[in-house]
Image (cartoon, rainbow, N blue to C red):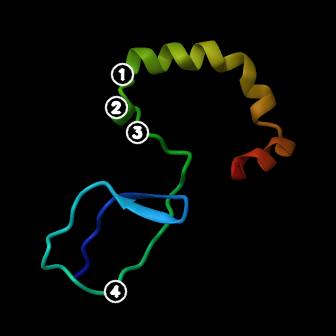
């Protein structure tokens, strides 16, 4: 049976966001998910704040969406 646990990979380490049962052992597979997806609620941002932020940052969207800006995604 497969069990999934959410976590974050940073600085060469995997930090689990929840603790698996202590009796759970076995091989693991790490799958990186789309980093563009951000859980705003987890970061303390509600819908109204998100809408306000999108509106204020709208003027930058054209620059951010240029193909040559993709080089910054890896940073």
Q: Earlier in the sequence, mark 3 or mark 4?
A: 4
Q: Quadrant of residue 67?
A: top right
Q: Residue at x 26, y 78 (%)?
A: 2
SS label for mark 3: loop
Q: Residue at x 24, y 73 (%)?
A: 3
Q: Is residue 19 above or below residue 62?
A: below
Q: Are marks 1 and 4 in contact (CB under 8 Å)?
A: no
Cα gap from disc 1 to disc 2, whole angstroms: 6 Å
Q: Are marks 3 and 2 in contact (CB under 8 Å)?
A: yes
On residue 27, which mark appears?
4
Q: Would you name the residue on which mark 2 appears? A: 41
On residue 66, which mark appears?
none
Closer to the camera in the image, 11 or 49: 11
SS label for mark 4: loop
Q: Would you name the residue on which mark 1 appears? A: 46
Cα gap from disc 3 to disc 4, whole angstroms: 28 Å
Q: Are marks 1 and 2 in contact (CB under 8 Å)?
A: yes
Cα gap from disc 3 to disc 2, whole angstroms: 6 Å
Q: Quadrant of residue 6?
A: bottom left
Q: Position of residue 75 (x, y in %)?
A: 70, 48
SS label for mark 1: loop
Q: Position of residue 39 (x, y in %)?
A: 40, 39
Q: Earlier in the sequence, mark 1 or mark 4?
A: 4
């Amino acid at each position: 049976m497969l069990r999934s646990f959410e976590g974050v990979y940073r600085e060469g380490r995997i930090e689990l966001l929840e603790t698996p049962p202590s009796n759970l052992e076995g091989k693991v597979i790490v799958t990186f998910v789309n980093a563009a997806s951000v859980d705003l609620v987890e970061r303390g941002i509600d819908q109204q704040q998100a809408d306000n932020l999108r509106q204020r940052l709208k003027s930058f969207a054209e620059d951010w969406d240029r193909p040559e800006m993709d080089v910054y995604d890896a940073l």
